[in-house]
Amino acid sequence: MNINFVCVARTEAAEHLLPTLFGAVVDDARGIFGEAEDHQWTDGRVAMFNADRMNGAWRPPTWHEEQSGGGHEIFAVSQPPIPVDEDHTPETYWPGLASVVRGGAMGRLLPNHFGIHRRSDGSVRVWADTLGVGRCYYVVTDDFVAASNHIGILTHFLDGPAEVDIEGVGRYALSGWFMRDDSPIRGIRRLREAQCIDVDPRGGVVFREHTDLTELVGARDARPDYDEVVAQTRTIARNLDALTVKVPTLYLSGGRDSRMTASIWLSGGGSARVVTLGTLEAEAEIASELMASLEGTFEPGQEVRHDVTVPTPGAITMPLHDRLANAFAMWDGDAAPTNARANVRIPGRSAGLSIGGVGGEIMHGYYYHRPGDYERIAELPHPVAYAARSFRGPLATDVAHEAMAGLFDDVYERAVGHGRPDIASLDYLYLTEKFRRWGNQALGSMSAIMLSGPAYVRACFDLEPDEKVGKVFPDEIVRRAIPPWADIRYYKAEVADSRRGMKRKLATYDTDPDYFHDVFRNPRLWPQFLRPKGVETFLKTIESDDALPVHESWLNRGLWIDQLDRHVEGLNRRRREVRA
């Protein structure tokens, strides 16, 4: 992860303490991720740090300084934001990006980052991307305003010891990601979609929105512009190809979403290593058929190869305890428990970009795709209430369920405020809540979701509900991007396929059953959120032929929640050492 950090001292006492805390931030970041092309800057009131450790992955640096308007400007980003509306080279990148940021036009950037702008007048702006996909957390106290994509280093700026956010974890137990503006730790909040924190030279703090989501999601009398989606997404793909160092990995399965993404990337001339997971044979067969249809059609200089890979348990060499320790060192609990299935290594400077079909859900009615859904939704006080059925859990306790109280009403109110009082408010829920979980699964600073550009999002919200259910969007895009692919069949896994896949894939339990059972025999925090009797039943099921991914998913959450308790203890020990 490329650590990006800023702190503004708001009082004289805070200015006195800032050098000590800033030193701890830098030491902690380097202790986890190692030294890189680090940048540090402070004027005694503002302190900034950026570990530009992805120079083997991204061509543009993540730190940029300019003299402007008679003063000194600094721009620091967690990873290079990708322009969506014009092509760039590494040489033109920062002059163009600096102009976009000064103008507050962050809607022209792909949601894959968070940024800091120290202006020449001494004020500071922190911004989250348009959809809140990039990691950005903040602390605001009487003494400090601090923001970073790393939660742990922000604990140094809390008024007291770090505490697990019980309500936030309750929602996490039922959803698998931290919702609203939650983080795992009380007092540390997530900067939500399209939000900015502006700190003036006197320490005054104002929260603003840099982009009105109504422009992207609000109801209007228009049809989806598929040609614009293809054109803009190809611009995104070209910029990703031009601004990254390695040939990207492009995932292709038998489904619609990855096919749509791959068709845009490859038809736009991008080089790629196309990868298909061979766990399910039907997917591998379809992907191979798709790639075979492109033989002899690639542009000069376009490097493309297709690999079918089948993971094997022998590939896991790291004990589960070490995997969890590394995961929490990077993400402090705000990531998917599935990350601990495989070896979890701290990424180096040469991570590669991976592109898949993430983001496709908002174009095909994620929460209303079954027969009878419309009728059931019509009986409810508002459409978002229907999504509550997807957040029930067979293992969840009353504490977890109570933490969800009012959430769906709040989301609906926000959706109405952005022009969606109709059934598309369910897609708004997905876009502003569930969508962000994908970025937090990225190991390094190489997260990029092609299906998050403004033209794509706008077109999805211009669809009629029956068009979403009928999967019209991806078929239209593929037909425009690579016409021969439109006639090749799709594949959707059935329950029986899931069981076969469960036996063959890398399951957390199979890779370290002793530690897995030890956590549940010696519980710490998880019984507050998961029912012990239900956990016991699932532990038996996971050893049988009846095991499904859902069984392990719930148990993985228990592992993750207990590790969170241990992790916060460690953060507090470090906090006491620094302030001693």
Image (cartoon, grey):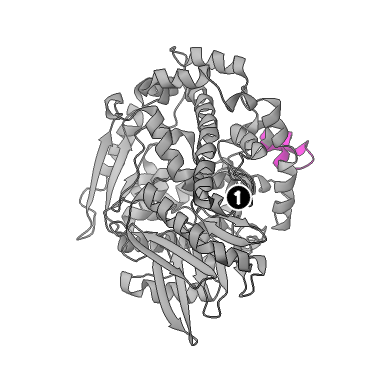
- Residue 485: horizontal and vertical position, in percent? 35, 45
Give the mark count. 1
Q: State the residue at coordinates (32%, 58%).
A: 36
Magenta stretch: residue 385 in it? yes
Judged left or right of residue 382, residue 43 is left
> Disc 1 marks which amino acid?
Ile
Secondary structure, magenta segment, majority class: helix
Judged left or right of residue 259, residue 109 is right
Judged left or right of residue 525, residue 358 is left
Would you place residue 303 above or below residue 379 in this image?
A: below
Q: State the residue at coordinates (49%, 38%).
A: 336
Magenta stretch: residue 168 in it? no
Q: State the residue at coordinates (41%, 70%).
A: 86
Query: Dot 1, how many residues are within 10 Å of its Cα: few (below 14), some (14-19), or many (20+)?
Result: many
Residue 447 in view in this figure: no
Judged left or right of residue 85, residue 403 is right
- Residue 47: horizontal and vertical position, in percent? 49, 66
Residue 121: which quarter of the image? bottom right
Q: State the residue at coordinates (73%, 57%).
A: 417
Would you place residue 484 above or below residue 41 in this image?
A: above
Residue holding disc 1: 188
Q: Nearer the viewer, residue 556 or 73?
A: 73
Would you place residue 349 above or below residue 209 in this image?
A: above
- Residue 280: horizontal and vertical position, in percent? 35, 28
Residue 236 in view in this figure: yes
Q: The magenta stretch spans which residues?
A: 372-387
